Amino acid sequence: MTGVDLEIIDPTASASRIRVRSAAVGDGYFPKSDEEKLSCGFFVPDDLLTKTEDGLRIVGRISDVINVAGKKVNPVEVEAHLLRFRGVRQAIVFGRPSELRNEEVAACVVASPGVIEADLLDFCRRGLSGWQVPKRIFMVDAIPANERGKISRRDLGRRFATGQERSVLR
């Protein structure tokens, strides 16, 4: 784009944030200025992008990244893997508190009858890195939404926190 400078912050990562500079970038951030988001005329959005043959593609948000003992897990990648399992209709992956690892990966899945957590976990172990494999997969009739009708990974992390797992919907 003419008049727009884009810079990939971590070109070696599979997904990275970008820095954007243009005449359209403001000099403040509502409700307060944030040096991480606005620095030296660059704006740093919370989006995670990957480089493709056609350019850049948004693959998630930095606030959704799960920190598993220092390893970063993009929940969108785990969701894409779960959706490849026959009978899985919907999947949402989120982080939940873990005493040992900062956070652990968990998921809610809507699937056809007969699809069980053990089979999904085995499928994940065969196709994902160890730190990406969910510790729990909750089989639900519908992906839980918050009071505004939106799906919030943060809310799901609290709702399905370790020790509160008995509130499963199915």
Image (spheres, rainbow, N blue to C red):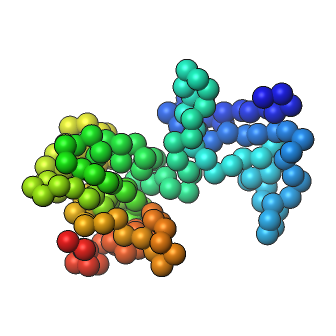
In the figure, residue 83 lies in which quadrant? top left
Q: Residue at x 80, y 65 (%)?
A: 30
Relative side of 108 to 6, left or right = left
Q: Which residue is at the front of the view, 74 or 101?
A: 74
Q: Is residue 130 visible?
A: no
Q: Quadrant of the C terminus?
A: bottom left
Q: Residue at x 25, y 74 (%)?
A: 169
31 on left or right of 90:
right
Residue 44 visible, this orientation: yes
In this rendered view, identify the residue nearer to me: 72 or 92: 92
* 148 relative to 40, above or below: below
Residue 152: where, in percent of width, then height?
47, 66
Q: Tell me residue 11's x, y (percent).
A: 60, 29
- The residue located at (74%, 33%) in the rendering is 6
Quadrant of the drawing holding the N terminus: top right
Q: Does residue 102 appear to the left or right of 47 in the view shown?
A: left
Which residue appears at 25% of the width and 67% of the height? 141
